Image (cartoon, rainbow, N blue to C red):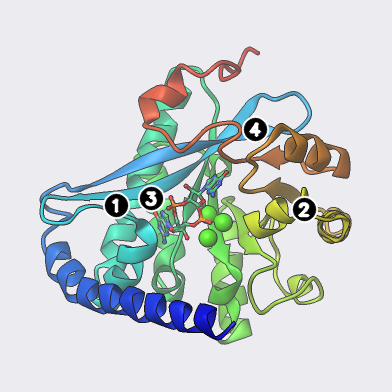
Amino acid sequence: LRKAGTGRARFFSQDLQAHLAGYAEVRSALVGALEREEFFLVYQPQVCAVIGRVLGVEALLRWQSPALGQVPPDRFIPVAENVGLMPRLGDWVLASACRQAGQWRAEGKSLRVAVNISATQLEDSQFSDRVRAILAEQALPAEWLELEVTESMLVGDVAECQRALQAIRRAGVKLALDDFGTGYSNLAYLRHFTFDTLKIDRLFTNAMNNDSSGDALVRAIVATGSELGLDIVAEGVETAEQAEALRKLGCSRMQGYYFSRPVPAAEISVMPGIDAAD
Ligand code: C2E
Ligand code: CA
Ligand code: CA
Ligand code: CA
């Protein structure tokens, strides 16, 4: 037991070192990265749990740095937030995703695009105006855009958060609560905010094939979410068994490697079950 503990401590300090060394590198490599067009988006399908059709996609940000290689978003987005790049990079993500959604629509493919937003974007009092402007620019009807916020973003001033989220929904944009179950909130807290969609974190999806208490948790989330009129999306679906169990529990959309990894837009266009006429 002691040996295992020591091993863990050693790994931890190595990870920490790599993380600390990485921060300055990431920060300096981020300077000018947007202008040099080092960012791009990939899209992961969200599949209808009942008939398997692709209903929409989640846009996920990627950074190919000439100096550092491909840096995962979990590593560079917090840095981008700290150095003040995030409102601009966030706008770029929104505009790119909306442009792509408009392009799919022009091809007869009606796919709702979900875009992750960060705390600094939501805190910006002009945010909902900018979302509206971007939708107008891309001639995209608001309901084809869904914005994903996480629970941890809603811990500050509740009234302020409510105002920001309401402004977005009044514009007709859909609102999803991401990573549900991992943050500070609970199902009761959910009643303070108006969401359209609840995304069950992949932690819970994962727990489903391990034990039956995992099933019970997901069942409770789906039941309460449905009662609140929310669309339930399960994240991180990796096996046929998970997909089947989630469908039976009443999840409406599913997302995960079992269906598809995040892929470039061109691969989405040729996926079966995409065309509006289906
Ligand atoms: P997220 O919003 O929870 O996105 C889901 C993450 O799970 C993605 O990681 C996706 O690639 C991964 N994933 C999808 N299906 C599976 C699966 O079946 N199994 C497993 N193990 N993983 C799966 P990714 O792309 O690395 O993104 C990580 C996080 O970075 C996102 O978590 C999100 O919080 C953030 N992020 C990504 N793009 C953006 C963005 O444009 N803006 C902001 N603010 N955050 C973003
Ligand atoms: Ca997300
Ligand atoms: Ca998530
Ligand atoms: Ca996450």
> N-terminal of the two: label 3 or label 2?
3
- The tag on residue 210 is 2
Q: Quadrant of the N terminus?
A: bottom right
The residue under label 1 is: 92
Assign a secondary structure to mark 4. Answer: strand
Assign a secondary structure to mark 1. Answer: helix
> N-terminal of the two: label 4 or label 2?
4
Tell which residue pokes out farthest to the top in this image: 277
The residue under label 4 is: 47
For residue 89, above or below residue 265: below
Q: Position of residue 252 (x, y in %)?
A: 76, 40
Q: Position of residue 55 (x, y in %)?
A: 62, 31
> N-terminal of the two: label 2 or label 1?
1
Question: Any atom of ligand 1 within 8 Å of the CB at mark 1?
Answer: no
What is the CA distance from the residue labelled 1 to the residue labelled 4?
26 Å
Q: Residue at x 82, y 40 (%)?
A: 245
User: Does residue 7 appear left or right of residue 38 in this picture?
Assistant: right
Q: Nearer the viewer, mark 4 or mark 3?
A: 4
The residue under label 3 is: 94
Quarter location, residue 119: bottom left
Q: Dot 2 surroundings within 10 Å: few (below 14), some, or many (20 or more)?
A: few
> N-terminal of the two: label 1 or label 4?
4
